[in-house]
Image (spheres, rainbow, N blue to C red):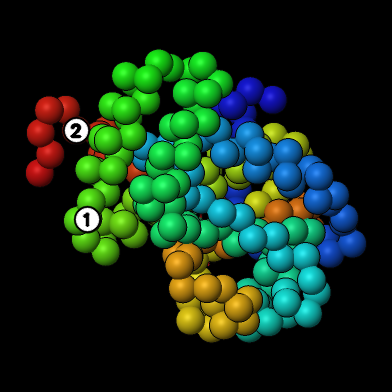
Amino acid sequence: MTLKNIILSRKSVRHYNPNVIIARKEILDAIELASKSPNGNNIQSTRYLLIEDKALRTKVRAAANNQEQVETSSYLIFVLGDYRAFETANIRAIQDEAFEKGYFNQEIKSLLTDAAIVYYQGMSHQGYVKELVRDGSLAAMSLVLLLNEKGYQTITMSGYDKTALFEALDIPEHYEDIMLLSVGKGAEDGHATVRHPVEEITFVNAIE
Ligand SMILES: Cc1cc2nc3c(=O)[nH]c(=O)nc-3n(C[C@H](O)[C@H](O)[C@H](O)COP(=O)(O)O)c2cc1C
């Protein structure tokens, strides 16, 4: 399938066949590829919590407006952003690794490291949230496309009570929620949805 066909055929699916089993390896392969998505300064803040345990799924469903797909899809992934990625030690470690692999010289390494450290210094909390959500959303989109390419259906979800969800999954405070992602084989097709005409959503040089 071409990328265009995947984009055109993908629909959010809310009813899944609960008997379909997806091997964890398949999900890990897709996550590995999704992690190649662009991310700010390559600090790699996005994390993926695979919720496999049935009892946990039931708890998550209760925290997610009782949405059926949370429990009946083959896989449930919680995409999170890790605030610790902004720490200088993480920034240095990533650029050191790339330098050691010979991807760039010492001068570029210092330039990239210093620029990233300065970029995050003194950033507001809202700024940090935006960074995590941008990076996590790009990765989640890649993951959605990859999983649809494999023949699965998906739905991204933000319809949950964050506090209840963090409590149910015992998630530490240094994580920000990005979205839940259900994956499986649809028992029913997702319904078709409309989009604004491109001329309505596109502006050239200035926007009102
Ligand atoms: C960030 C995000 C959160 C969403 N949260 C939910 C949700 O909690 N429950 C739900 O049924 N659909 C949810 N959706 C799915 C949207 O309703 C859906 O993408 C939109 O209606 C367009 O339909 P399509 O995905 O089939 O093209 C969410 C989508 C996004 C991108």
Is 93 left, or right, of 107 in this rendering?
A: right
Q: Residues within 10 Å of mark 2 (few under 14, many from 20)?
A: few
Question: Which residue is denoted by mark 2 in the rendering?
Answer: 203
Residue that label 1 marks: 123
Q: Nearer the viewer, residue 43 or 65?
A: 43
In the rendered image, residue 29, in percent from the top left (x then y), is placed at 73, 39
Q: In the rendered structure, which amino acid carries the disc numbered 2?
A: Phe
Please indicate, yes or no, whether residue 135 appears anywhere in the rendered image.
no
Depth order, front residue of 40/178: 40
Compute the Cα span from label 2 to label 1. Answer: 30 Å
Q: Is residue 173 visible?
A: yes
Disc 1, SS? loop
The residue at the point 41 percent across, 39 percent down is 92
User: Which image quadrant for residue 28?
Assistant: top right
Q: Position of residue 149 (x, y in %)?
A: 69, 34
User: The residue tagged with tag 2: helix, strand or loop?
Assistant: loop
Location of residue 65 in the rendering, given as x and y in whole percent from the top left corner: 56, 80
For image coordinates 26% across by 56% down, the residue present is 127
